[in-house]
Amino acid sequence: MTADLKAALLKPASATRFSTSFIEGYLSPAFGARSKSEVDLLVFGSLIEAGVIDPQAPLYDLARALNITPTRARNLILNWQLRTTPRDGDLRQAIVAALKKTRFSKDGTLLTFGVESPLLKEEITARLKRKGVFPDASFSRELVKLPVDAFVAFLDEIVDEDTKKQVRTTLIKDKQLPDTSFKALATGVLAKLGEKVAGEVGKEFAGEVAGKVAKPAADKAIGFLTGLLTGDAKAATKNIVKDDFINV
C-alpha cells in the first residue's frame, strides 16, 4: 500500500482498474442511487481493486493514507469485509492464522490478545457470546479479554490438533498456561526440593544447623532422580506431594 494515493492512481494500470470498478459500482442499480456512505465504501473498495490500498495493512496506516480517523478506517474495512466475505464462509482458518501471529498477556484470571481485523474480531466475539462468554472490550476495540478456561474451550472448538499444540506452546512461552511437559514437571520438582534443602540448611536453631529438617527434602530429590534414571516412575513419584512442586 502506498501513502500517496493520487500518485498511485496516475499509473495507467491502477487508474484503469479503479475507474472500471467505480463506474460499474456507481451505475448499479442506477446512477446517483447510492448514499454518501455507500459511495465512500465504493471508492474504498475500488482503491483496493486498483491495488493502491492493502486491506490487510494496519488500521493506522490506512487512516494515514486516506487522511481519516482510525475509527473511520476501521468502519470502512469492516463494511468492506462484510460485503466481500461470503455469508456462509468459514472464518476458522483466518482466526487461527491471526492467533498464530498475536501475543498474549494475562491480567489476573483474564487472558488478553489482539486481533486487528475488524471482521475477525467481531467473529471471535460472536462465537464467544454463543457460548455464553462476553469478552471485555472496554479498553480497545482490537483487544479480546476473557477467562483463560473460556479461551481454551474456544480453541478446542475451532482449531485442528496441530494448531492447538502450536497455540498452546505460545501460551506456555508467554507464561499464560502451565507447562505440563516432562521437562517442566521434573524441573519444578527438583527446584522446589532444592529450595527446601537450601532454605532449611540456612537456618540455625540454638546454634545447630537444621540438617535433620533438610534431610527429608534431599532424600526426596535423590529418590526422584533415582526413580527416573532407573525407569521406575512409581518410585520416582511415590513421595512427591503438591508442596514439592513448582510449575516453571
Image: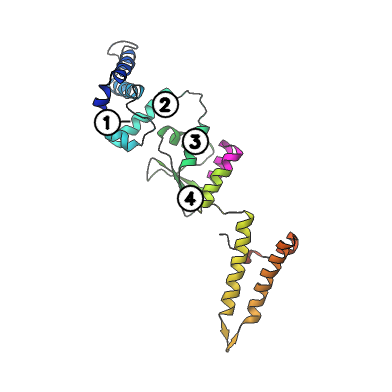
Q: What x and y, as percent, mark residue 122?
A: 44, 34
Q: Nearer the viewer, residue 89 or 230?
A: 230
Real-space Cα distance between discs 4 and 1? 36 Å
Q: What x and y, as percent, mark residue 135?
A: 46, 43
Type of amino acid under label 2 = Leu
Label 2: element kind: helix
Report the disc number at residue 110.
4
Depth check, mark 3 against mark 2: the one in front is: 3
Q: Mark 4 packing: few (<14 Cα in 10 Å), some, or many (20+)?
A: some
Type of amino acid under label 1 = Leu
Which residue lies under the disc numbered 1?
66
Q: Mark 3 packing: few (<14 Cα in 10 Å), some, or many (20+)?
A: many
Which residue lies under the disc numbered 3?
95
Type of amino acid under label 3 = Ile
The magenta segment is 151-164
Real-space Cα distance between discs 3 and 2? 15 Å
Disc on the earlier residue, 1 or 3: 1
Quadrant (top left/top right/bottom left/bottom right) for the N terminus: top left
Label 3: element kind: helix
Disc on the earlier residue, 3 or 4: 3
Which residue: 31% across, 18% down?
Answer: 13
Real-space Cα distance between discs 3 and 4? 20 Å
Q: What x and y, as percent, mark residue 229?
A: 71, 62
Residue 66 is one of the magenta-drawn residues: no
Which residue lies under the disc numbered 2?
82
